[in-house]
Image (spheres, grey):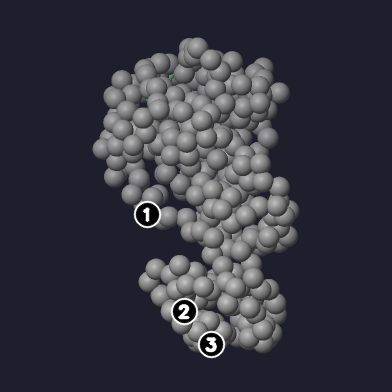
């Protein structure tokens, strides 16, 4: 089965890294056929659309995924459409939508939607068009003079990430991470449903919420009682009940058993809550304590500011950086997202 994914253009490397992490974590064999700006085409030999739906539901930097039905040069589209056995695919109400991904295409998108709709209509007598909420969504992509037509498998809900924005949760504190980035960081650790994830600098609980939604058991700690109370409130608000959140200093954290993943966003600069200690010292001491809490095959995903020398921080620990992504926040701050394993 060939699957096309429309990736977010918000970042150049995170969307693909996230898709690969989730496929790997779900045990799905795949081969990348094409990867271009905003579009990823995968060959997934042994899976069904249902399994792909599970993958899509976890993603944050992907817009939608569809199973490819036709792929050709633009000038062959109409004749290919006329030959295609639409009766086998379009058995109930449907819509056709066209997306131009560059300026090269000769087609006018609404005219083409109408033309494709007419061809399908003729081939499927009695089946109705439903532009509002169709059971079958035929997605067409125009890119580089080529056209891809597919049946949508799933769409990532923008509403979820919008409704869970930090200022919409019961407890808010400045410096909270966006739910989209939090979900992506959780995914980069390849955590599976039922496994345990720790955020030792949990703040308002944004990372724990996303991990809880993908089915992880979550443990959160923070040095500040206010954050501990607020995180619990936010988790309850999001319907997450399998959690443990308590006050602790990440530099001295001990747990009864090791966790499968750590995802965290430690404080930047000088942290008032650690008595004005420089963040490098805080990171170094925390990393020493956290290395003993992660299982040998576990992964840690860490957000740090660009000016922190992570190699120096990790010196003398068992952590090894295996992947890094840079997110420019503003002129003077780039966030570095690193994935670490235990070597
Ligand atoms: C950048 S915030 C985390 C934000 C969080 N990702 C969110 O979305 O709300 C860092 C948190 O680390 C906590 N913190 C600072 N020093 C700490 C320490 N030594 N141990 C544990 N938590 C600490 C702060 O109280 C703060 O809540």
Please identify the residue farthest to the front as the structure is shown.
126
Give the residue number, with chain letter if any, for mark 2. 127
SS at circle 2: loop
Are the residues at dot 3 and dot 1 in contact (C-beta closer than 8 Å)?
Answer: no
Whether residue 1 sits left or right of residue 234 in the image: it is right
Q: Is residue 232 above or below residue 18?
A: above
Q: Quadrant of the N terminus?
A: bottom right
Tell me if I can see residue 11 in this picture.
no
The disc placed on residue 57 is none
Q: CA distance from mark 2 to mark 1?
A: 30 Å
The disc placed on residue 159 is 1
Q: Quadrant of ligand 1?
A: top left
Whether residue 272 sits left or right of residue 91 in the image: it is left
Q: Is residue 156 above or below residue 307?
A: below
Q: CA distance from mark 3 to mark 1?
A: 35 Å
Q: Is residue 93 above or below residue 241?
A: below
Are the residues at dot 3 and dot 2 in contact (C-beta closer than 8 Å)?
Answer: no
Between 52 and 144, the one nearer to me in the picture? 52
């Amino acid at each position: 089965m060939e699957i096309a994914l429309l990736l977010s253009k918000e970042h150049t490397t995170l969307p693909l890294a996230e898709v690969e992490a989730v496929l790997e974590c779900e045990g799905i064999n795949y081969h990348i056929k094409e990867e271009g700006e905003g579009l990823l085409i995968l060959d997934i030999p042994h899976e069904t659309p249902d399994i792909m739906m599970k993958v899509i539901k976890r993603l944050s930097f992907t817009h939608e995924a569809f199973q490819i039905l036709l792929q050709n040069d633009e000038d062959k589209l109409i004749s290919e459409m006329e030959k295609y056995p639409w009766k086998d695919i379009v058995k109930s109400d449907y819509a056709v939508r066209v997306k131009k991904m560059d300026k090269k295409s000769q087609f006018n998108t609404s005219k083409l939607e109408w033309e494709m709709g007419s061809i399908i209509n003729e081939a499927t007598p009695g089946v109705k068009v439903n532009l509002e909420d169709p059971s079958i969504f035929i997605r067409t992509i125009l890119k580089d003079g080529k056209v891809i037509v597919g049946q949508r498998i799933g769409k990532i809900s923008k509403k979820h990430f919008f409704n869970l924005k930090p200022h919409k949760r019961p407890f808010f504190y400045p410096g909270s991470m966006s739910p989209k980035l939090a979900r992506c960081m959780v995914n980069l650790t390849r955590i599976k449903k039922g496994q345990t994830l720790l955020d030792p600098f949990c703040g308002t609980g944004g990372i724990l919420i996303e991990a809880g939604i993908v089915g992880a058991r979550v443990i959160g700690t923070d040095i500040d009682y206010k954050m501990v109370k607020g995180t619990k409130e936010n988790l309850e608000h999001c319907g997450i009940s399998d959690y443990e959140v308590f006050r602790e200093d990440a530099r001295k954290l001990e747990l009864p058993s090791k966790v499968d993943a750590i995802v965290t966003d430690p404080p930047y600069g000088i942290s008032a809550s650690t008595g004005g200690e420089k963040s490098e010292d805080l990171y170094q001491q925390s990393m020493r304590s956290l290395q003993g809490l992660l299982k040998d095959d576990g992964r840690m995903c860490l957000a740090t500011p660009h000016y922190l020398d992570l190699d120096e921080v990790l010196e003398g620990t068992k952590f090894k950086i295996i992947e890094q992504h840079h997110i420019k926040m503003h002129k003077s701050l780039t966030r570095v997202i690193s994935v670490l394993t235990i070597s």
